[in-house]
Image (tube, coloured by chain):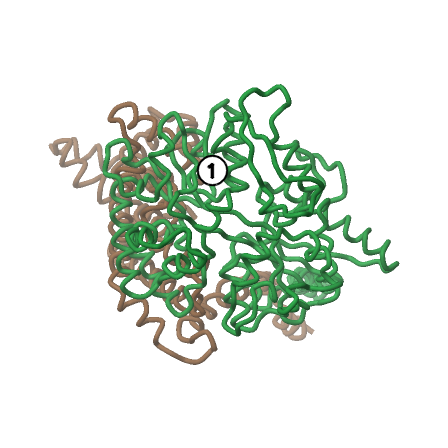
């Protein structure tokens, strides 16, 4: 009797451990594992969060069954920062077939040889059959932008990543407090006027806040460039991606200066709500978050917020689908091809709020449904988006926007070609990473 | 026959076997993580033995500054907590004011609510107050003051409880006797009440000092993320850092924090062992 009790007590923790072990072993049962950002895909829910339809992942399983007759199971897991994803991946605690990191992380992982290339042909600049939807529906502007971004081995960004969403970084601001002219330059963060004192929140992430300082520190160098030159963007990118010791020192000084005067605080997530509540009047924000703030300000408190993309330029970021080494290449490509269909991409864009690089009729319809002025609207202005939509739609990509909406959601999601030409893709800091990190801790301590 | 029974008893020590789950638990969740931290602290990303992580931490003046600032914040918080908790605990332990112990529960009630939510609430309250009175948000303008207020608010119950427990055990006759024998109220307090509650004071100090040294969420919320204490830096290394040695350097800082807390416990031990009274804690 005593003996059996003893055995039971011993087995209880072992049982518990066994359950844990079997839980962690689960992921092997999936044919395709996707590792994506939180809230970054269509989950089949309507505005109130009720499930009304198959989410993208579920719909893909059905689509694949219809196409090939094979039933597959797709696993879907989420991460909340690039670094978290990178750590999990390098520790081997998760082995996904498809991940969705940001530009600098793609660069780092590709340079470290952690990524499997897509079947991208650098000569024809096409993926071919396995990813024909990107060839067909990828925005000509985005394609042009990323074809020429190269990695250490000289291959194009597009060899390792298919863009999924992109956006810019600017200020969400309260137009009742700030005029557009107050916040249309990065210099506003170093304005010593009383109106600017403790009115800005920056990002508690050194990469984003570094951008703000770089435009201030090299203001003169940037102004000396010729914006009409063909190589303007690549020249600007060189300045934008400076991270030598002298630059880091200047950035540190600039950030410390701003922290003591115009900066209210740092945030990563709560800023998009705090700006709505009026805790401060300008928030350094990614365009998608800014759209979220503008929407929720309108719905919740009938407050108007605007988005300003500083005129000197800014950061244009993108997240892209990549395959880690050892991925199920065939299924992964099939999924990326599926999500590049305009209808599917439009669903995701509707759910996520960032700008999709996919164009086509379904996408054009969504943009029109969101932003186009009603017929009886009196004051409107016309925006020509043909640089972005190309010939993927019938007719000309022109859209009429109510004048009252200037500087708001539409402008945040679709900046002009001229402004985009002033936005740069951020590179990995490489061997300078530790120095930049140490600088960031110094700024904060 | 009887010998055989004893032998069997020895072999299957039932009471002893009850410890098994705890032993397994301790090994898995206390000893193993500690070994891991030690391992990481003395190796590089490739698993090679090195002291470089210690160099990374200690050659950077910022880390010293952060450790110092954390220590000062924790010390101020501890002193304030004990100063505020002491009279409260004294009143609570007095049956005249607290006959059915409801008051004790009222003071402990905030602990039933998640401390992050409590801190956010406190932040809104304080900022609203300072905005109305002086026209600025305390958390943005004086982050250090705000952090101390947040810490004191969150950890006050940890100071009240051990003091209250100790004061319940006070010998009231001694206090009365001291007064009868001509001691003035101040002397009664310093000569009888304080000596009798020293174990409670020591316990209250450790109960507030330890969590304030290691917490970072309160500092985040109460300073709008602009002021980093040692917990934040550890979080930075384990979370946002892109360095290949992130876990290794982070582990060194964790060990440093562990050492500071360990030393403070040793000091507490040496104080309370001088005093013969029973030691109390909240566990």
Compared across the picture, whether B62 is left or right of B39 comes to: left
**Secondary-structure class at tag 1:** helix
Give the quadrant of residue B174.
top left
Q: Is residue A133 visible?
A: yes
Of residues B169 and B74, the one drawn nearer to the viewer in this rendering? B74
Give the quadrant of residue A410.
top right
Which quadrant of the rendered structure holds the N terminus of chain B?
A: bottom right
Looking at the image, the residue that sits furthest to the bottom is B48
Of residues A269 and B273, the one drawn nearer to the viewer in this rendering? A269
Q: Residue at x 82, y 51 (%)?
A: A62
Compared across the picture, whether B248 is left or right of B193 comes to: right
Q: Where is B74 relative to B257, above or below?
A: above
- Chain of the residue where label 1 is placed in the rendered structure: A
Q: How many marks?
A: 1
Of residues B226 and B271, the one drawn nearer to the viewer in this rendering? B226
The tint chain A carries is green
Give the quadrant of residue B247.
bottom left
Of residues B31 and A35, the one drawn nearer to the viewer in this rendering? A35
Q: Which residue is mark 1?
A: A272
The tint chain B carries is brown
Question: How crowded is the residue under tag 1: few (<14 C-alpha within 10 Å), some, or many (20+)?
Answer: many
x, y percent for residue A373: 60, 26
x, y percent for residue B209: 32, 50
Q: Residue at x 74, y 56 (%)?
A: A74
x, y percent for residue A243: 35, 63
Q: Residue at x 33, y 24 (%)?
A: B96
Q: Residue at x 56, y 20 (%)?
A: A378
Looking at the image, the residue that sits furthest to the right is A69
């Amino acid at each position: 009797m005593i003996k059996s009790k003893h055995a039971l007590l011993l087995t209880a923790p072992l049982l518990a451990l066994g359950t844990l072990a079997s839980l962690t072993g689960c992921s092997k049962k999936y044919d395709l594992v996707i590792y994506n950002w939180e809230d970054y895909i269509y989950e089949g829910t309507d505005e109130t969060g009720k499930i009304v339809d198959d989410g993208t992942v579920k719909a893909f399983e059905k689509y694949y069954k219809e196409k090939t007759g094979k039933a597959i199971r797709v696993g879907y897991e989420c991460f909340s920062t690039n670094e978290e994803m990178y750590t999990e991946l390098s520790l081997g605690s998760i082995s996904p077939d498809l991940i969705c990191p940001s530009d600098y992380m793609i660069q780092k992982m590709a340079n470290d040889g952690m990524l499997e290339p897509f079947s991208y042909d650098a000569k024809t600049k096409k993926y071919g059959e396995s990813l024909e939807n990107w060839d067909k529906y990828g925005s000509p502007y985005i394609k042009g932008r990323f074809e020429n971004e190269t990695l250490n081995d000289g291959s194009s960004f597009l060899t390792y990543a298919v863009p999924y969403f992109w956006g810019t970084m600017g200020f969400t601001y309260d137009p009742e407090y700030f005029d557009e002219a107050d916040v249309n330059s990065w210099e506003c963060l170093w304005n010593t006027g009383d109106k600017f004192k403790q009115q800005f929140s920056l990002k508690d992430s050194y990469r984003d806040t570094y951008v703000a300082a770089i435009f201030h520190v090299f203001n003169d160098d940037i102004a000396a460039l010729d914006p009409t030159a063909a190589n303007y963007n690549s020249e600007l990118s060189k300045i934008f991606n400076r991270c030598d010791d002298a630059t880091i020192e200047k950035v540190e000084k600039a950030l410390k200066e701003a922290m003591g005067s115009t900066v209210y605080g740092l945030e990563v997530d709560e800023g998009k709500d705090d700006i709505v509540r009026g805790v401060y009047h300008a928030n350094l924000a990614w365009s998608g978050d800014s759209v979220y703030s503008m929407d929720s300000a309108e719905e919740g408190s009938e407050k108007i917020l605007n988005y300003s993309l500083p005129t000197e330029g800014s950061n244009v970021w993108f997240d892209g689908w990549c395959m880690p080494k050892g991925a199920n290449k065939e299924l992964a490509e099939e999924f990326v091809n599926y999500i590049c269909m305009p209808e599917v991409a439009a669903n995701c864009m509707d759910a996520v709020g960032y700008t999709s690089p996919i164009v086509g009729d379904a996408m054009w319809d969504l943009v029109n449904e969101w932003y186009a002025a009603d017929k009886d609207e009196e004051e409107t202005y016309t925006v020509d988006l043909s640089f972005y939509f190309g010939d993927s739609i019938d007719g000309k990509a022109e859209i009429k926007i109510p004048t009252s909406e200037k500087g708001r959601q539409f402008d945040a999601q679709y900046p002009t070609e001229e402004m985009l030409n002033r936005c740069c893709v951020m590179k990995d800091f490489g061997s300078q990473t530790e120095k930049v990190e140490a600088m960031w801790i110094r700024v904060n301590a | 026959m009887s010998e055989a029974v004893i032998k069997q008893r020895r072999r299957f020590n039932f009471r002893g076997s009850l410890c098994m789950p705890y032993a397994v638990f301790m090994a898995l969740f206390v000893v193993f993580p500690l070994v891991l931290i030690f391992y990481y602290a003395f190796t590089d990303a490739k698993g090679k033995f090195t002291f470089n992580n210690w160099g990374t931490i200690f050659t950077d003046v910022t880390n010293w500054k952060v450790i110092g600032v954390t220590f000062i914040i924790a010390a101020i918080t501890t002193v304030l907590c004990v100063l505020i908790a002491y009279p409260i605990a004294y009143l609570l332990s007095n049956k005249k004011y607290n006959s059915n112990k409801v008051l004790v529960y009222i003071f402990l009630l905030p602990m039933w609510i998640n401390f992050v939510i409590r801190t956010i609430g406190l932040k809104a309250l304080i900022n609203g107050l300072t905005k109305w009175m002086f026209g600025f948000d305390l958390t943005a303008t004086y982050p250090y003051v705000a952090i101390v207020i947040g810490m004191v608010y969150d950890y006050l119950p940890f100071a009240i409880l051990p003091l209250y427990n100790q004061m319940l055990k006070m010998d009231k006759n001694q206090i009365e006797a001291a007064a009868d024998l001509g001691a003035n109220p101040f002397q009664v307090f310093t000569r009888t009440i304080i000596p009798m509650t020293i174990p409670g004071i020591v316990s209250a100090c450790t109960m507030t000092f330890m969590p304030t040294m290691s917490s970072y969420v309160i500092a985040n919320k109460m300073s709008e993320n602009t002021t980093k204490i040692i917990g934040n830096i550890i979080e930075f290394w384990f979370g946002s850092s892109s360095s290949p040695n992130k876990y290794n350097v982070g582990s060194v800082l964790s060990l440093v924090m562990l050492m500071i807390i360990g030393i403070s416990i040793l000091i507490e031990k040496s104080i309370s062992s001088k005093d013969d009274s029973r030691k109390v804690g909240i566990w």
